[in-house]
C-alpha cells in the first residue's frame, strides 16, 4: 500500500543545551518531556494517541491528527507546555532541568501505513527548529522562560494573523534566518517572556572639522545653548518669547 498524501500540522521540540549532561540526565529529560508534551496535548483537546510521534534523540517530532485546529497547537498547547516545564524545573535536579525550542509548520506530508511520515514540510520544520533567532532568543531570556516558539510564515498567516482565540499578533516578531540551504522568514514568540528588541540603527558621528575643533550645539525651549570646542562652555540665554 502506497503512502497517502495528507495536509497535517507538524510540531518539533528540542531540548536546549542537552549535550554534555550525560546519558542518565538525558534519559530523565527525554522521559519527562514526553510526559509533559502528552499532558499539554491532552489539555489542548488533541488526542495524543492519534498523533504520530518520532524520536529526535534530544527532542521529538509530532504529526497532529487530521483536522486538528492549528491555533490550538499554539494556544493553549505551547503555553501549557511552558507552564509544565517551569513546574518541572522547580523540583528537578539542575542537570535534569529543561528549556526547549518548539517549531510549527503545516503542509502535505506522505503518510505510510507503518506510521512513517515524509515530505518537504518536515524539512522546513527541521530548519525552523535549528533557526538561530529561536536559539538566541531562548539563550538570552530569563531562566523562568522555558520555551521559544518559531512559526513558519504559512502557519502564522493561517492562525496568528487572523487573531484566533488566545493569539495576539503583537506577541510575535518576524525574523529571517538561513539554515543550510533554507532561507526563510518566520515568526518568533516567547511564552511568558518579552521578545528581545531589535538593535536600533546607529547614526554615525560626523567627522571633526579641519583643525580638530568640534562644535556641538543643543538648544532647549528655555533658551539654553551648550557649546563644545576643545572643552565645554555653557552659555545661558534668558528672556521670554
Image: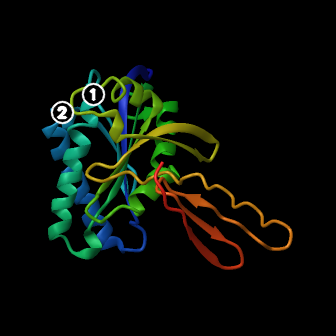
Q: What mark, if any, has residue 65 been given in the picture?
A: 1
Query: For mark 2, what is the residue?
Result: 47
Which residue is outermost to the right? 210
Please tell me which residue is depicted at 26% across the width and 44% down the height of the picture: 78
Q: Which residue is drawn at 29% across and 23% down?
A: 66
Instruction: Give the CA distance from mark 2 to mark 1.
Output: 8 Å
Give the image location of residue 169, x and y in percent. Answer: 35, 33
From the viewer's perspective, tell me whether residue 69 is left or right of residue 179.
left
Q: Where is residue 199 in the image (x, y as percent from the top left)?
A: 53, 54
- Most foreground residue, 143 or 13: 143
Q: Can the viewer see residue 19 in this picture?
A: yes
**Foreground pick, 142 / 113:** 142
Q: Residues within 10 Å of mark 1 (few under 14, many from 20)?
A: some
Element class at badge 2 = loop
The residue at 27%/63% (across/down) is 29
Q: Residue reaching furthest bottom?
A: 231
Residue 111: tell me if it is visible: no
User: Closer to the camera, 119 or 151?
Assistant: 151
Quarter of the rendering containing residue 103:
top left
Q: Is mark 1 on a helix, strand or loop?
A: loop
Residue 202 x %, y %: 61, 56
Mark 2, Cα crowd under 10 Å, few <14 / some 14-19 / many 20+, is some
The image position of residue 180, as x and y in percent, is 62, 47
Q: Residue at x 48, y 53 (%)?
A: 221
Instruction: Quadrant for residue 22, please give it.
Output: bottom left
- Residues marked 2 and 1 touching at CB (< 8 Å): yes
Position of the N terminus by quadrant? top left
> Could you tell which of marks 2 and 1 lies nearer the N-terminus?
2
**In this view of the protein, which residue sits in the foreground, 151 or 160?**
160
Please say if 78 is above or below 141. Answer: above
Q: Residue 225 carries which label?
A: none
Amino acid at each position: 500500500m502506497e503512502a497517502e498524501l495528507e495536509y497535517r500540522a507538524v510540531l518539533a521540540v528540542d531540548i536546549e543545551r542537552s549535550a554534555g549532561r550525560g546519558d542518565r540526565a538525558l534519559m530523565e529529560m527525554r522521559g519527562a518531556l514526553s510526559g509533559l508534551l502528552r499532558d499539554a496535548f491532552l489539555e489542548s483537546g488533541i488526542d495524543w494517541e492519534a498523533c504520530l510521534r518520532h524520536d529526535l534523540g534530544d527532542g521529538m517530532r509530532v504529526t497532529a491528527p487530521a483536522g486538528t485546529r492549528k491555533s490550538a497547537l499554539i494556544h493553549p498547547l505551547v503555553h501549557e507546555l511552558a507552564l509544565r516545564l517551569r513546574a518541572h524545573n522547580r523540583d528537578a535536579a539542575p542537570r535534569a532541568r529543561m528549556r526547549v525550542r518548539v517549531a510549527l509548520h503545516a503542509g502535505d506530508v506522505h503518510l505510510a501505513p507503518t506510521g512513517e511520515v515524509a515530505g518537504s514540510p518536515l524539512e522546513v520544520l527541521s530548519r525552523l527548529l535549528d533557526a538561530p533567532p529561536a536559539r538566541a532568543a531562548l539563550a538570552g531570556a530569563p531562566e523562568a522562560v522555558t520555551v521559544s516558539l518559531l512559526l513558519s510564515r504559512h502557519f502564522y498567516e493561517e492562525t496568528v494573523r487572523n487573531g484566533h482565540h488566545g493569539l495576539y499578533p503583537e506577541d510575535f516578531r518576524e525574523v529571517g534566518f538561513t539554515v543550510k540551504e533554507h532561507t526563510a522568514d518566520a515568526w518568533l514568540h516567547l511564552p511568558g517572556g518579552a521578545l528581545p528588541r531589535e538593535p536600533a540603527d546607529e547614526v554615525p558621528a560626523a567627522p571633526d572639522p579641519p583643525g580638530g575643533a568640534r562644535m556641538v550645539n543643543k538648544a532647549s525651549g528655555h533658551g539654553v545653548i551648550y557649546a563644545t570646542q576643545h572643552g565645554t562652555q555653557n552659555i545661558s540665554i534668558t528672556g521670554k518669547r
